[in-house]
Image (cartoon, helix red, strand yellow):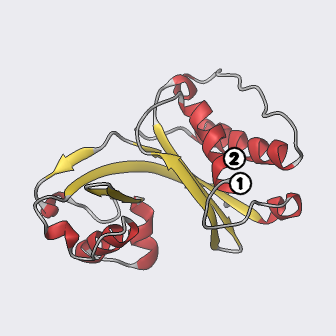
Amino acid sequence: MELTDQEKKTLLEIAKRAIIAKAGNKELPKLTMDLPILKEKRGAFVTLKKRGHLRGCIGYIKAVKPLGDTVQEMAVAAAFHDPRFPSVKDEEIRELSFEISVLSPLKKIHNIEDIEVGKHGLYIVRGYNSGLLLPQVAIEYGWDRESFLKETCCKAGLPPKAWKDKETEIYIFSADYFNDKV
């Protein structure tokens, strides 16, 4: 599933150009789908950080659109529609760092031993509640498997130990994630 350097660079450019256009009240750039990966339906998240702090993160868990379109749409959503943050201002754009996570399909698990911290992201569902944490989040915070499960439950609005409940569904996925840091 590993993307090439050219594919990563292209996806980062798509995200940046989309945010720059939206901030300037311009139409989103028309995508040229010259790389085959851009046409593949894939789930993806776009994460924005400002001075190392989260500034927006939104994505599609499942493959609903071609990857190029997904990254463009999620970049705009992360910058302007993440309910946790105000919309990105034009003058902030040069301070943003961009990270893209291209997801594998979800796999339901029944044994938490199947979770490899650092390799897998988690998606937890119970009733109407759901929460997702990308694989790199566990690494950034130094979490072990159980901490990762607890934090994903909290993200879902569930009690920290809800992952132990038989009604709670646990899914894993992997992600090819990359950023614009040199």
Using the rendered view, name the quadrant where residue 61 is placed.
top left
Point 35% across, 64% down: residue:
118
Q: Which residue is mark 1?
A: 80
Q: Which mark is residue 76?
A: 2
Residue 120 appears at what percent x and percent y?
32, 56
For this view, does 112 lie left or right of residue 68?
left
| Between 130 and 67, the one nearer to me in the picture | 130
**What amino acid is at disc 2?**
Val
Residue 124 appears at what percent x and percent y?
29, 58
Local packing at callout 1 (Cα closer than 10 Å; few below 14, some 14-19, many 20+) is: some
Asked if labels 1 and 2 touch by Cβ distance under 8 angstroms, the answer is: yes
Tell me if residue 105 comes above or below residue 140 in the rendering.
Answer: above
Point 30% across, 66% down: residue:
117
Per the model, the C-alpha gap separating discs 2 and 1 is 6 Å
**What amino acid is at disc 1?**
Phe
Could you tell me which secondary element the residue under label 2 belongs to? Answer: helix
Point 43% across, 34% down: residue:
63
Local packing at callout 2 (Cα closer than 10 Å; few below 14, some 14-19, many 20+) is: many
Point 71% across, 26% down: residue:
31
Asked whether the viewer can see residue 146, the reply is yes
For this view, does 141 lie left or right of residue 114?
right
Residue 169 appears at what percent x and percent y?
20, 54
Looking at the figure, which quarter contains the N terminus? Answer: top left
Could you tell me which secondary element the residue under label 1 belongs to? Answer: helix
Using the rendered view, name the quadrant where residue 82 is placed.
bottom right
Residue 140 appears at what percent x and percent y?
46, 73
For this view, does 149 lie left or right of residue 32?
left
Number of marks: 2
Tell me if residue 49 comes above or below residue 38 in the rendering.
Answer: below
Asked whether the viewer can see residue 101, the reply is no
